[in-house]
Image (spheres, coloured by chain):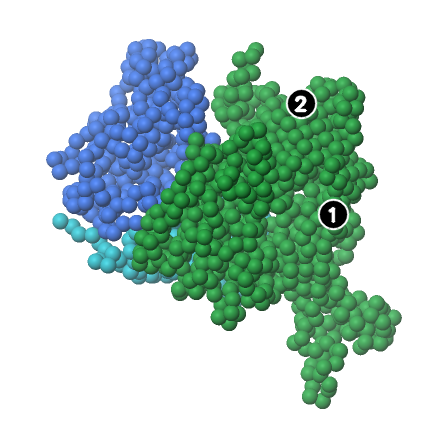
Amino acid sequence: MHRDYVEKEGSPLGKATTRVDAFIKATGRAEYVEDIQSRFHDLLHIKVLRSPYAHAEVLSIDTSEAEKLEGVKLVLTGKDCPRTYERSEVFSLPAESNATWAGQGIAAVAADTKETAARALKLIKVKYRELPFVIDVKEAMKKDPQAVIDPKLGTYPGGRQYKPEAPNIASHQKVRTGDIEKGFAEADIIVENEYYSSRVSHSQMERASCIARPDPDRKGLTMWTNGCGVHLIKSLICSLLKLESSRVEVIQQYQGGSFGNRLAFSVEPLCAVMAIKTGQPCELTFSRQEMFIGSPSNWPVTVIIKTGATKEGIITAQQMTVIEDCGAHQNSVRDGRSTASGAVPVYRVPNFYQDIYAVNTNTPPVGSMRGLGTPQVAFAVEQQLNMIADKLGMSQLELRLKNILDKGEYNAYGEKVRSIGAKDCLRAAAEYINMDKQPEKKADGPWRYGRGISVAGKQNTPQGRSEADVIVYSDGSLEVRISCDENGMGAETAMAQIVAHEFEVPIERVKVTRAQTSKTPYDMFSSSSRTIYTTGNAVRIACLDAKRQLCIAAGEMAGVVPDRVEIRQGRADIIGGTLEYINIEDLFRPFSMFEAQQNRNLRKSTPVVGHGVFAPAPAIKWDPEIGHTERMWNWYQYNACGAEIAVNIETGQTKIIRFVSACDMGFPINPQMCEGQAHGGLAMAGSFSCNEEYMYNDKGQIINGSFVDYRLSTILDMPPNKDVKCVFCPDPLPDGPYGAKGIAESVTCPVAPAIAEAIYNAVGIRPKTLPMSAERILKMIEDREGQK
Amino acid sequence: MFREYYVPKTTGQCLEAAKAYGDEAYYLAGGTDLVVKMRSGAVSPKAVIDLSGVDGLDKIIQTDTEMLIGAMCRLTPLSKLAQAKGIDVICRAAGHVSSIQVRNMATIGGNTCNASPSADTVPALIVMDAQAVVAGFAGTRRIPLADFFAGPGRTCMEKGELLTAFAVPREKDITEADYQKFSIRGDSDIAIIGAGARISVGSGGVITKARVALGAVAATPIRAYKAEEMLTGQKLSEELVAEAAKAAAEEARPITDQRATKQYRIKMVRIHTAMALKNCMDRIAGNVRT
Amino acid sequence: MIGPVNDLLGKMQIHIQVNERDYDLLVAPDRTLLDILRNELHMTGTKQGCDDANCGACTVIMDGKAVKSCITLITQAAGKSIQTIEGLSRFEDGKEKLHPIQQAFIEHGAIQCGFCTPGMIMASKALLDESPDADEEAIREGLHGNMCRCTGYVNIVKAVESARDVLKGEK
């Protein structure tokens, strides 16, 4: 383990420090957005009328009856909305023209009670003309498809031109590494398959919620939200409402999870527009059903893949088509590249071709979700390797170890590998799940047992600047002001740990101030498992800045140059002077009317503010013909999963018997929280793998958009605690704070393929469709029996 | 959600209050289903008649010939009576309804009167030949539970009638029964199918009475009459169990929905009917298995 | 002929006890306990996460039993004693003393986003009050009506087991 920075005695780094927000959350006092609604006596409640049709032209909207209802303040339709044409608006603002998915907002009501708003929705009369729609992504890609938008409109929202021959293909990108023909010619074994992973939901426990209040003092708007990235929300609202930057304040309340869902602003734009138009504070909170049909999900991925290897088990070629179903609206970052990148971080593949498509369908627009498409691709790549290992009679561990990249090598995108813990992770997972042995029992009644391992990586996107302010008060206490999101992953605690480490003080002396645009400095948002990396680095730099200022002051007092001063344990230690040290509080001098008060000396009640800015090194634009660059992504986090699974051959049900997650997060700043990420990632990905999927009826409507029928895992779906194991195999990242990368997403990447492999070892079938639901597994078992 | 709220003390008062509103009054038992439906707007009654104040509706009474389970018996206490001879299967089924929080409020009468095809207690009640004791202005009448349902969400009770109890006859012969709930995420999930089975054996181990009842395979919970016939008069054996389970599967008429396809449900009926029958068989043989 | 218990304006007098304090309410009977706790009594520790009583974030204890307050009408709580997350800790000697379950949730990392936490803690309390010896299986059975998307439940189970041992030691 990387301990260079950690050997300092008493440092909280690398230790299971109690979360700074645990107490307030355990006592029910943490205020989430909905909890502060009662502060506003004249609060209006917003409800959204949604299209029942997957594709329809809105011919007319008659709002007159709704407007007459007592208590209704405003009925808003798409034509009355300001727009910036940023993708995030599509979840929030009523449709401008046509409805392009079942669930798209058509009109919205603000009323003095939720009940009145709901009643008003029923009084809005909308005339629709139904249009042909397409749900299936392959259907959407065909030569003469039904278009996701009405051809009459001419352009897609976002400006893409309508192309009659391929109207729904939003993006096609290519990667061409080596010579694919030659690679397959060198192969002794070739396996070719198609994999599909379903649409799944973030389903964080707190629904999207926001309050916007016209602010007479600010002559603008104040917003309270559980959305991610307060500064981004602010800039969107400013441009939407044509308000100057100084006029909008966005405050983040406690967030009840996100997993990427809150990176799309599902509620904020509409709430802000309503507040400005009514002149009253407005709140908008999605129902759970609206979270399914009106806020983003992940994107379904189809992978058609061909892999070649020599009989020694060396991969010679991999060719794949990756199709990302991005729903009714394309997102600027949803071009398929992040998804496709799931195929490169782990293995050495000299000849590697990818064709990457992003395709529109008449389904809810997608958004970032834990893993950003890479787990779906790992599901394909890892199973390909298992099949090759089987054919070669080689252990899966050995085959993988032969092909895993080493540090310093270049991956198939041409990127230099700077940190990779994949081998250690895989070995650890294999060891803890006893991969070289059969399960103790192979069969018990209808249950069959099997084990599987898998390894995968997740890129980090090199965007997102972070800033931090570290404040040193004249009594030596500390405050860190950050705008990164605290979705629950523990960012605030980690930042407090970093400050406590840098100043060598107990963490209790560090106060964390959460995101609020007028107080806390810029941060893009917490995505791509980057918070520790970008915000953590910014906090560290801010600490150095604050310490430098203290060193200058102490140096002046002690008559030494600043670099002869070290700030630690509440003191400025002087090296080489007559004074041994000065207490921090003594660096701040009291005011005196007999002294000049504007000089450089530090003054009581005027804290020192250190500012830190960190942005990752820029990516280098890739050649569009071959998709190559030395720096497309920032770094990769790695994870291996081991799973023992029981399969019921009568019902097709699967049960997780044992679960191992081996994580390369660079450095575990807080091991307890890293473990929490691993546990949560296993449970979530286990649930994605076996149970979760959106289902549609023949009208294109989602029919299981509730916690009744969308099968989120419960406490019964995890094995006993003794059978859940978490191991750390960190490979430090050179520019990560204390070597740290991130962990949240990569945990989920290898889970589905590990489970799939365990199922194969239990019952001899290879599931290629996610989720590996009971029905699908049973059907596969029966089909195989039928063939016998 | 509603305008008027009644808390009657007697069955008569319930009937009176309900009469005044016709279709627009709902009885409230535990509320775990009704409140969800009212909140979503699926039902919007004018009046709600809370049964929790009515004397005696939450009692279990034993007579020489039958057990009377009050309609307002809550599922948690009921589930703890799994040793109660003659109604043990009903009590065990009660323990499979959703989570502890729901069972603490939900009642056995409510679980029946929702008329959900997947209600867990219903197949158990049916196999024990339970009758719904229904109070109306003309007095009380009894409806065999297998005939109690008219369709999803609909019972055969007349407007304003009130289910007060279930009468479960006492069986002289050795009787064992079992209920198998099949769902993906344990009891929190709604059953994909439910299979209830009951076997009574007379002298020489001959089956004197057999019942197989299925949930979530038709518009209402149903009895699998062919399977029952096949069992009656025979001696229990693994082969017989398999045959009867197959017959039950043939009698199921499920639909495809978001929880499962029709074909899958049919297969699950066979598997879980067999398990339920097998458990009856084992219990009769003295090998208790749950 | 009996009449409705609510008055002409639709409201009804209801007495409830919440966290050992008495409240006399005049409210419409069609409101849920969750709604009253949050919007009338301003006890916002109890959360709502779904539409249909599946997530368990609204769990409170009513007369010793865990219930989902989002499907409990306020009338059903009339005359009863309710415990919510706000009433679990005690202030003693100038310091807040947490309930052992709260303390265990903090120590064992059972809290991440914290949204399910109040419901999870109340369900755990009802469970341990009734079954002081609850083993891991009983804990999972008692908590499967409470969903958590962050923790994978591992540390939650650990916390409840640890609280169980502490509580047993206290007796």
> On the rendered structure, is A286 left or right of B218?
right
Mark 1: few, some, or many residues within 10 Å (few <14, many ≥20)?
some
Image mark for residue A192? 2
Between B45 and C97, the one lying in front of the other is: B45
Give the side of residue A278 with respect to residue A417, left or right: left
A204 to A576, vertically: above or below: above
User: Helix or strand or loop: what does disc 1 sit on?
Assistant: loop
Q: Could you say which quadrant of the image residue B204 lies in?
A: top left
The amino acid sitting under disc 2 is Glu
- Horizontal side of B159 relative to A581 (left or right) equals left
Identify the chain drawn in cyan: C
User: What percent of the width, then of the height, locates residue B130?
Assistant: 26, 27
Residue A549 marker? none
For disc 2, the neighbor class at 10 Å (few under 14, some 14 to 19, many from 20) is some
Distance from label 1 to label 2 (Cα)? 33 Å
Residue at the outermost right position = A576
- Which chain, by letter, is green? A
Residue closest to the eye, A28 or A495: A495
Judge by depth and name the residue closer to the eye, C21 or B3: B3
SS class, disc 2:
strand
Q: Colour of chain B?
A: blue
Residue A40 vs A190, above or below: the answer is: below
Q: Are marks 1 and 2 on the same chain?
A: yes
Residue position for label 1: A619
Residue B278 shows in the view: no
* Percent coordinates x, y for residue A49 in the rendering: 40, 48
Q: Chain of mark 2?
A: A
